[in-house]
Amino acid sequence: MTSSDRWTAVLIAVAGLLMIAAIGLVFGVAPDPVNLESPVERFSQRIFYFHVPSWWVGFLAFTVAAAAAALYLITGKERWDVIELSSIEIGLTFITIGLITGSIWARSTWNTWWTWEPRLTTAAIGWLTYAGYLMLRGAIDHPQRRARFGAVFCLIAFLSVPINFMAIRWWRTIHPVVIGTGSPDAQGGFATGPTIRLIFLFCLLTFTLLYFALLSLRVRTEWLSRRVQQVKQQMMFR
Amino acid sequence: MSYLRKVLAIVIKDVSAELRTREMVSSMLVFSLLVILIFNFAFDLRADNQRTLAPGVLWVAIAFSGMLGLSRSFIVEKDRGSIEGLLLAPMDRSAIFLGKMLGNVLFMVAIEIIILPVFVVLFNLSAGDLLPLAGIMVLGTIGFAGVGTLFSAMVVHTRAREVLLPVLLFPVVIPVMLSAVRLTAAVLDGLPMAEMQNWLSLLIAFDAIFFALSFILFDFVMEE
């Protein structure tokens, strides 16, 4: 066990413990927001503690991936390509979680699973863009070319992240903005108190740690699988 | 040869190759007319809902036919082996990008010149809308072709080739498409300039961003 493996193990253990604590806090300690009327709304509001951090991890992952892509194009070091790919895979997983949790929340608050308004639309586009990234990589055989094209596409795809983030602040939309001020048309927003905010920050921290734990794990498996490929090639052509 | 002359040389090469066969522009044109026709069946276009559907129909026709042209853009070079010739030519890679992109814009504009009047006739629009619509179309086309040319150069090296291009390009160019559709709708509704300002700035901003990014990143795509 190398020292980086030990760090990964520690990171996973800490993220796991914090996640258990977060679940306890969200369902046991967090108070109901004062301005929500029905019990269904009050209960579904708790999805917020997982929905927003999922999107935050998605955006963080895509930002890390874009930085790694730029570094790959500049330095040409394979390490950055591995980080970029791993980060996008994790980001895509988390925005999928974000889309699903948002949809469940919308069903109970907006009375619909899905509606075509700017936030949801840009979110869906972001998902499709990064799914395209994986398809692009899957369709290229040459390893260096796959890495280069992946990095190029990743940088362009990253444009969708700021649009997605700003969508609820630029356009009139019904998606609530809990942090900062949103559009007057927003529906389903709620008042936050100090406890709610604290628990939310705790969830953000937990999800961020979870992201780094998953990233180090995924980077490791990707390295190993590439190493296996290399060994296989050597065995075949010996 | 100056940089501009090199760019022009590529544009002239593409245009004259197209003028000899006319296979791409003609299929793009017929295809875009077909799209307008299919929409007519699919949505049962009537006088009362025409105005709301027209901008979408127009831009779907442009985007789909543009996609045909873009996917051919580098595939013909690759299949005839002339891509090596381009790479060997003593010029900057960015000149290849500019030349190819200008060629693609020209082909798309050629289609638009024909379908815009058809569109005006079919949807019973006033001729006074022609000029602002043409401006929006050119801006939308530049944004579409900028990043489209980059992706077109990428997908020729993949296994799926032309199948992959729309999958990659459509989600990315949505900001351009969206603002172009909104601007078109605003023109058809006769809204004042001030109300279109936001969408116009968004369209121009994305044209500039996509162009700049593609221009820079093209070097990495053509690295062989």
Image (cartoon, helix red, strand yellow):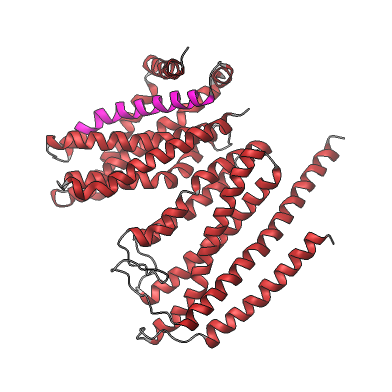
- Within the image, what quadrant is residue B128 found in? top left
**Front-lying residue, A232 or B208:** B208
The residue at the point 52 percent across, 61 percent down is A95
Return the x and y of residue B37 as percentages of the image width and height. Answer: 26, 39
**Front-lying residue, B170 or A3:** A3
On screen, residue A14 above or below A66: below
The residue at the point 39 percent across, 73 percent down is A107
Question: Magenta segment, principal secondary structure?
Answer: helix
Q: Describe residue B12's horizontal placement relative to residue A140 as left or right.
A: left
Is residue B132 inside the magenta stretch? Answer: no
Q: Which residues are magenta?
A: B93-117
Q: Describe residue B155's horizontal placement relative to residue A145 as left or right.
A: left
Is residue B106 inside the magenta stretch? Answer: yes
Return the x and y of residue A29 as percentages of the image width and height. Answer: 53, 87
**Front-lying residue, A83 or B124:** A83
- Within the image, what quadrant is residue A229 found in? top right
Question: Where the C terminus of chain A falls, by quadrant?
Answer: top right
Q: Describe residue A48's horizontal placement relative to residue B191 as left or right.
A: right
Q: Residue furthest right?
A: A238
Q: Describe residue A121's horizontal placement relative to residue A22 as left or right.
A: left
Return the x and y of residue A218 as percentages of the image width and height. Answer: 69, 57
Return the x and y of residue A193 as percentages of the image width and height. Answer: 44, 82
